[in-house]
Image (cartoon, rainbow, N blue to C red):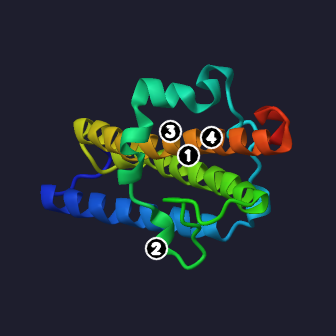
Amino acid sequence: MLLELSSLHVILINIAVWLAVHLSVPYGMTRVPLGSFDDAVWLYRRRGWERDGRLYERVFGVRRWKGRLPDGAVVFKRGFAKKCLKGVDNGYLESFVRETCRAELVHWTIMVFAPLFFVWNPWWAGVVMVAYALAANLPCIITQRYNRARLRRVLGRRTGMPAEATA
């Protein structure tokens, strides 16, 4: 801890900083053009070990709980609701795939801020803040990767191409 603050001040700062991060990062990302997000890019690319999203079903049971996650897109006018499909045409599904990339980047970016909390928190509270960041964001990342793989499978079946070729 680099700063000496009272416990009340630390708690208030933690709440304020997390709130600012959770609102500003997605707001900023909604300003990035959708065309900037491509699931062929390294960060979003499907990995063989993910088994086209099936790993997330088997290991994490994502289908059972993903519907309970909040959809932050409803907070912003430019947000893209991902709670359920609003269309089934290929263009919409391609946009949805790109939006899963945007959402994944939002959650990775939010986690990047976690080490900042060591500046004003005791070391153990900094660890708690990192644990919070992981617990709050990893389920969202898992869900985006799972949904993207499923959407790619659907698009692949429609075009008669393997899911990898539709990216």
Residue furthest to the top in view is 49
Q: Is residue 59 left or right of residue 98?
A: left
Q: Give the CA distance from mark 1 to mark 3.
A: 6 Å
Quadrant for residue 135, please give it. top left
* Residue 70, above or below 1: below
What residue sits right under mark 2 in the picture? 75
What residue sits right under mark 4 in the picture? 150
Q: Give the CA distance from mark 3 to mark 4.
A: 12 Å
Residue furthest to the left in view is 7
Q: Secondary structure at mark 3?
A: helix
Asked whether 113 or 139 is in front, the reply is 139
The reply to whether the C-beta atoms of the residues labelled 1 and 4 are less than 8 Å apart is no
What residue sits right under mark 3 in the picture? 142
The reply to whether the C-beta atoms of the residues labelled 2 and 1 are less than 8 Å apart is no
Q: Tell which circle, 2 or 3, labels the residue nearer the N-terminal end.
A: 2
Asked whether 50 or 113 is in front, the reply is 50
What amino acid type should be assigned to the residue bearing mark 2? Val
The reply to whether the C-beta atoms of the residues labelled 1 and 3 are less than 8 Å apart is yes
What amino acid type should be assigned to the residue bearing mark 4? Arg
Asked whether 145 or 155 is in front, the reply is 155
What amino acid type should be assigned to the residue bearing mark 1? Gln
Quadrant for residue 10, please give it. bottom left
Residue 82: where, in percent of width, then height? 54, 59
Q: Tell which circle, 2 or 4, labels the residue nearer the N-terminal end.
A: 2
Residue 75: where, in percent of width, then height? 46, 73
Residue 40 appearing in the image:
no
